[in-house]
Image: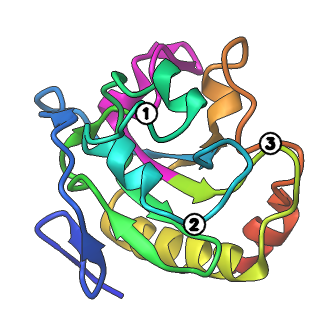
């Protein structure tokens, strides 16, 4: 696995319009892990990609009426089967963290890479997702000065709970070795 011009090689790319430039001189030094499933607690389908590209149809599901106008994205999405989709170049600022702060620094989107795992706060993640996440993390750490790996809940604790109680941090962190 390699990175070229901010994109993983051999990975499907679906371009999101929801990104912008990082502040000049800002170093990418944090990885933020999220979970997402659309509709909530349901897996598969095109809905996450539709949300990240502004194409989510509010008539497809009642829940979509509450989120279809959100302008959000992530750098990567790892499906439950290990498939990876990239939406935004790592060199650009994806809009994944929202109002956030880590160790006294606000606006975590400015200096982080966001990875969404297809999942929820209510059930375990498959081993293939940990394997793929660890492989990608090692690649990113070889390319960017990643110092911190955190959950969305660590940078927005009042608003967010992901990656959730079923994300097995010891399994993930041990697989990085």
Q: Earlier in the sequence, mark 2 or mark 1?
A: 2
Indicate the secondary structure of the residue bearing disc 1.
loop
Indicate the secondary structure of the residue bearing disc 3.
loop
| Location of residue 141 with respect to 147 vertically, above or below | below
**Disc 1 residue crowd, few under 14, some 14–19, many 20+, Cα 10 Å:** few
Mark 2 in CB contact with mark 3 (< 8 angstroms): no
**Disc 3 residue crowd, few under 14, some 14–19, many 20+, Cα 10 Å:** many
* Residue tagged 1: 59
Q: Residue furthest front?
A: 59
Q: Earlier in the sequence, mark 2 or mark 3?
A: 2
Quadrant housing the N terminus: bottom left
Q: Position of residue 117 (x, y in %)?
A: 60, 58
* Residue tagged 2: 44
Labels 2, 1: front one: 1
Instruction: Give me the disc on residue 164.
Output: 3
Point out the stretch of residues depicted in magenta: 96-115
C-alpha separation, residue under disc 3 versus residue under disc 1: 28 Å
């Amino acid at each position: 696995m390699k990175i070229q011009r901010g994109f993983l090689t051999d990975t499907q790319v679906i371009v999101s319009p929801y990104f912008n430039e990082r502040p000049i001189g800002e170093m990418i030094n944090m990885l933020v892990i999220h979970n997402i499933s659309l509709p909530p607690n349901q897996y598969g389908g095109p809905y996450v990609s539709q949300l990240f590209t502004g194409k989510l149809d509010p008539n497809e599901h009642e829940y979509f009426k509450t989120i279809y106008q959100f302008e959000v994205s992530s750098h990567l999405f790892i499906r439950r089967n290990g498939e990876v989709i990239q939406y935004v170049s790592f060199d650009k600022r994806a809009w994944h963290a929202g109002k956030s702060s880590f160790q006294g620094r606000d606006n975590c989107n400015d200096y982080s890479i966001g990875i969404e795992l297809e999942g929820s706060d209510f059930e375990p993640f498959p081993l293939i997702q940990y394997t793929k996440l660890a492989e990608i993390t090692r690649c990113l750490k070889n390319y960017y000065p990643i110092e911190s790996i955190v959950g969305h809940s660590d940078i927005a604790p009042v608003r967010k709970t992901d990656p959730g109680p079923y994300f097995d941090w010891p399994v993930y962190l041990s697989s990085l070795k």
